[in-house]
Image (tube, rainbow, N blue to C red):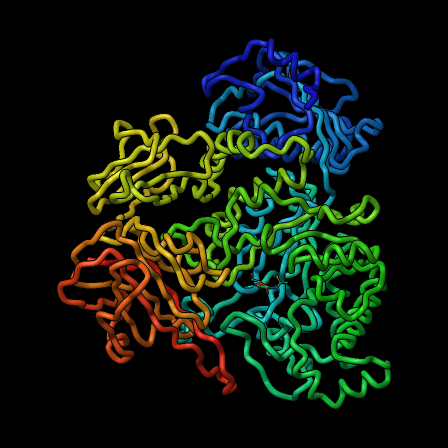
Amino acid sequence: MRVPCFLALALIIMPVSNIFGQYRENNLPLVPRPRALKLLTGTFTISPVTQLVVNTDVAASDAGYFSEYLKKHYGLALSITRSKHPKKNAVNVFTSEDKKYRGKDAYSLSVENDKVILEGNVNGGTFSGLQTLVQLLPPARLNALNIPCLFISDSARFSWRGMHLDVSRHFFNKEEIKKYLDDMALFKYNTFHWHLTDDQGWRIEIKKYPQLTQTGAWRNGTLIGHYSEANELYDTIRYGGFYTRDDVREIVSYAAKRHITIVPEIEMPGHALAALAAYPWLACSGDSFQVARSWGVFKDVFCPSERTFGFIDDVLKEVSEMFPGQYIHIGGDECPKDRWRSSPLCREIMATNHLKNEEELQGYFTERVEKILHKYGKRLIGWDEILEGGLSPDATVMSWRGNVGGMAAARLGHDVVMTPTNFCYFDYYQSNDENEPLAIGGYLPLEKVYQFDPVPVELNESESKHILGGQANIWTEYIPEFRQVEYMAFPRMCALSEVLWSDPSGKDYDAFITRLTGQMKWFDFLGINYSKALYDIQSFSYPGDRNEGLSVELSTTCPGATVHYTLDGSDPVFNSPVYSSRINFTQSTGITAEVFTGSKPSGRIFKKLFRINNATGREVTLAHPPNEEYCRGGGFSLVNGVTGSLPWKGSEWLGFLKDDLDITIDLGAERPFTKIGVDALKDESNRIYFPVGIMIYTSPDGKNFSEISELDSSSVQKFDRLITVPVGNQRSRWVRIVAKNRGICKNENGQEDPVWLFVDEVSVE
Ligand code: TNX
């Protein structure tokens, strides 16, 4: 790789230090990483006598934001003056039409000893530059704020840098939305996708239809626990809230000041139960409805009748008036066709309009809605399902079910926003730790977000031009508090900001982490609640030295982290041993460990008990491999000293679909034992059943096995999790354990479904 000459130059410039340590180009806490950065000697100090100088109205508005920021976080009140020429002892904020600022949000920031000159385009250029400046300030309330002298030239890679928030499943008030917008601005996000309506609540006041918020904004309780659990328990708390038209106007202008465009989403034709509860005539069936208390997908949806289109026209007219941005999101995802299929009216509409099936009927629905939007000067954007029934070229597609929809749309010439679940769903777990707050499922760690590229490699250059950018989505089924929204967003939002803003050729996860750890001081200073999953410790077990016991490796996803540990159960302190190589032991041992930054503990404490028995760390063979969805760690994970954790999603249980567990363990030498243990999981709502029998065999040669003990199904069912099989006094080198899978079970439609057998850890004692 060629080193740009200013970088080479920087190497010979002496680093300048301040009270927060030494400034270096690679440790300035700038996220997202700017395109080009040259660190110079010296500092500029912002103090109460520093002026803010601006040349235009946009510059004045941007500088106004900066001045409010300084007031709020440092108690500094700076005066703003107008001038065409930069002044000394001032932060000069100048918008410019120069062609060097034609790039998206392009700006340059020059910090000199006696002044700061920030120049950029009016469309977010100077504002983005101010965010960079904000990140260079000290994260502490001081009177004199030192900034290192430097030169930055920067612009964004994508024009759509989005964050979404679902305010239907849980409601967040006006102040919380403003905080979200502040958080977004700090990381140069420019699009807020506001998911305002769904089955569980309609959250925006519509003058013509007051019941939408009087009825549709409130539900009589909320599901307790996870949706996939069988016992449907609800609290009885009336839950809801909505934004008045004034609230919306206030939020829109708050966002505009931060160069953030709001894309409101009004979901249709599915996810519409709250609207149907308010106006049942919007449905095909003539039934009455309740605002949903549970999650998932509901069969009652908008009926594509003329009366519904009239309603949608009225609603979108008001929504268009409230939001100045060009886009309105109309949802379009997860619309079951059951009600349309059984509706005579739908059949009639399909016949009149020559529609072959209900998918095409949704295409017709989308087309009608698009015409309404065009009438109000707006453009349509929807989830990738809108592609399925045919789509007009002006519509933009938001690809959430992987990249496939986005690629198909781009190839058809549609603009696309990429938000695939596997990289962009911030409602997924960011850590495997058992103490994580309940989440919808999935696993999306920081590093994976950082690896995301919104432009699929399969697309050619002209197709790629249709990718406007990307976005992370925060669905809030399991996120009742705003603090938790921030926890799910941070620091993953930082990783995504770099994906969406920075030049991908400079992608470097380790370097990102160095800058991010600087950012964490900011999170603390600004009161942003964030996850420290980055410092989580993971363990990997291997057979122990000389094939006895275990050898345990500790690792973190944080490059260069120092791990301190203890083996006596006490919390690690700075003087505890530093982990440097695998820990070996032959007796059951608990490891407690934590990441330290300098002398400060930084993450959460890792505590794990490694149980040793005759089988631990031994060689095993499985007669049937586990299902590829649940096979992490392979057969060895059954003898790695660690029992499976809960929730089981994302953890290391082995899952056998219809197959038995059939494992043979080579104990290395003939050994005495009296009982066998099998740790299995019971979660029948997820079709995970206990085994229906366990057979134990031994062998003198590893080839010929004879049965020594058996537990029948009724004895097995008496256990709750760990099944123990007594075998009398035995000696053998080879032990084979078979746990029989129940095979099939009947589902609610009376059909037969294959059954899961979930096992972790077997023991020979
Ligand atoms: C799917 S993403 C949905 C949402 C859920 C989300 C949970 C999309 C367009 N629809 O209704 O909240 O999954 O991850």
Residue 691 on image: x %, y %: 34, 73
Q: Quadrant of the N terminus?
A: top right
**Quadrant field for ligand 1:** bottom right
Q: Is residue 749 above or below residue 467?
A: below
Q: Quadrant of residue 35?
A: top right
Residue 377 located left or right of residue 641: right
Question: Could you say which is closer to the camera, residue 605 or residue 185?
Answer: 605
Q: Quadrant of the C terminus?
A: bottom left
Q: Please name the residue shown 78% across and 75% down the image.
A: 360
Q: Please name the residue shown 50% across and 50% down the image.
A: 488
Residue 55 located left or right of residue 164: right
Tell me if I can see residue 236 in this picture. Answer: no
Residue 110 on image: x %, y %: 68, 19
Q: Please name the residue shown 57% across and 60% down the image.
A: 167
Residue 383 located left or right of residue 717: right
Question: Could you say which is closer to the camera, residue 269 or residue 413?
Answer: 413
Residue 173 on image: x %, y %: 54, 56
